[in-house]
């Protein structure tokens, strides 16, 4: 049923409180196989309760805790655990993830302000995945197709006894979903390139499960678009999406590693070292920005950065958004935000804007 109609955006909630009504559409033309190029995605971020999806502005009337992007639009979560999706014209509740607990323990935050165990989107295509707990502490991974507007898989997860709260999705890649119950949330995107630790793998099309080592997973990622190789050489570096990777400018050159540790980067498709530069005029008057976070790949050539330099001095507002091109080696300011603006919420990493949204939602829930 429709809940609200505002500024041309329709809100809908399924008749069941726990799951969205599935569409019967079977068109899967936007499904992208692993390693292939997907559609370009618009620069996406949220300010308060408003999502900016490229040139579209969507007023959700909801406090967002996380934001993720597919080729079809943006998914977001709220404090009550609901998962929502918007294509820029309508907003639909599509599922239920792990809710926050604001009154006692707060939300468990991941790196750079992102709640753990929320939604994970594929680098290309229309797939999302999240963890649900329909039967107490027995989690299930839900895979959802935002083009078909349909749940395409539900996978029971058997967590090991070491840490029953550690289960999390590592990645959604084409037809496959990877997850682990390891204590290390960075598996597959860390320095453990040769680790024999196992990731679980599920194929949506065949319904088959298998295991894969982190080392094998790294080999799968090589030569894939929308990835970076970070390390001394192309052969010895770690393949990763770069999401939540912190960067710094040494002079005018962008390097991986905050505060100028200066690890080089390579394009895994072309094999060449990346030399990315920004205008020397960019910054706060004391030199080039020194801490930025990659939060979104727009296409195979462009990615977006959030300038979190002000966080070093406790300033959580007015962060600029930059876009870098691999082909030209240039980074430019795409959205210059005034200091009066609050901290934005950006896909995949959240930022302090997500914590501010959690505080607003918690106050509203407690009636303050």
Image (cartoon, rainbow, N blue to C red):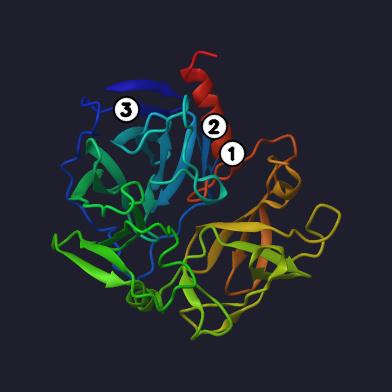
Q: Residue 357, which numbered label?
A: 2
Decide: few, some or many residues near mark 1? Use Cα within 10 Å; few <14, some 14-19, many ≥20: many
Side (left or right) of 233 relative to 75: right
Residue 260 spot, x, y in % from top left: 72, 68
Q: Residue 353, which numbered label?
A: 1
**Circle 2/circle 1 CB separation < 8 Å:** yes
State the separation of the CA atoms marked 3 and 1: 25 Å
Dot placed on the residue nearer the N-terminal end, 3 or 1: 3
Q: Residue 100's quadrant in the figure?
A: top left
Decide: few, some or many residues near mark 3? Use Cα within 10 Å; few <14, some 14-19, many ≥20: some
Give the residue at x 36% y 77%. 215
The residue at the far top in this view is: 367
Side (left or right) of 165 relative to 259: left
State the separation of the CA atoms marked 2 and 3: 22 Å
Quick one: 368 or 248, which is closer to the camera?
368
Q: Nearer the viewer, mark 2 or mark 3?
A: 2
Q: Residue 335, which numbered label?
A: none
Q: Residue 160's quadrant in the figure?
A: bottom left
**In the rendered view of the protein, which quadrant contains the C terminus?**
top right
Residue 173 spot, x, y in % from top left: 32, 63
Q: Secondary structure at mark 3?
A: strand
Q: Secondary structure at mark 1?
A: helix
Dot placed on the residue nearer the N-terminal end, 2 or 3: 3
Asked whether residue 48 appears in the rendered view, the answer is no
Q: Residue 12, which numbered label?
A: 3
Residue 58 position (above or below residue 227):
above
């Amino acid at each position: 049923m429709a809940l609200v109609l505002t500024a041309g955006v329709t809100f809908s909630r399924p008749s069941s409180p726990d799951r969205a009504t599935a569409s019967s559409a079977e068109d899967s033309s936007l499904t992208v196989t692993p390693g292939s190029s997907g559609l370009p995605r618009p620069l996406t971020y949220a300010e308060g309760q408003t999502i900016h999806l490229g040139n579209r502005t969507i007023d959700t009337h909801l406090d967002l805790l996380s934001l993720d992007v597919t080729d079809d639009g943006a998914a977001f979560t709220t404090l009550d655990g609901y998962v929502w999706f918007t294509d820029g014209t309508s907003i639909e509740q599509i599922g239920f993830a792990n809710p926050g607990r604001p009154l006692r323990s707060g939300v468990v935050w991941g790196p750079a302000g992102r709640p753990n165990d929320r939604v994970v989107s594929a680098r290309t295509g229309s797939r999302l995945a999240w963890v649900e707990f329909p039967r107490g502490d027995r989690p299930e991974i839900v895979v959802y197709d935002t083009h078909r507007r349909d749940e395409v898989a539900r996978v029971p997860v058997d967590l090991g006894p070491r840490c029953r709260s550690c289960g999390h999705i590592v990645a959604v890649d084409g037809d496959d979903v990877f997850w682990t119950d390891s204590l290390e949330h960075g598996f597959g995107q860390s320095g453990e390139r040769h680790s024999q630790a196992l990731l679980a793998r599920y194929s949506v099309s065949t319904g088959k499960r298998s295991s894969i080592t982190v080392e094998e997973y790294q080999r799968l990622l090589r030569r894939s678009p929308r990835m970076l190789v970070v390390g001394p050489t192309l052969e010895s570096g770690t393949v990763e999406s770069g999401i939540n990777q912190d960067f710094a400018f040494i002079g005018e050159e962008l390097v991986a590693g905050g505060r100028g540790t200066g690890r080089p980067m390579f394009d895994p498709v072309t094999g060449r070292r990346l030399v990315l530069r920004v205008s020397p005029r960019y910054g706060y008057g004391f030199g080039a920005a020194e801490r930025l976070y990659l939060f979104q790949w727009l296409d195979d050539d462009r990615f977006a950065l959030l300038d979190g330099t002000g966080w070093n001095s406790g300033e959580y507002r007015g962060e600029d958004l930059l876009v870098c091109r691999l082909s030209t080696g240039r980074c430019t300011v795409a959205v210059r935000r005034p200091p009066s603006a609050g901290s934005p919420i950006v896909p995949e990493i959240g930022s302090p804007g997500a914590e501010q949204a959690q505080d607003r939602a918690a106050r509203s829930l407690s009636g303050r």
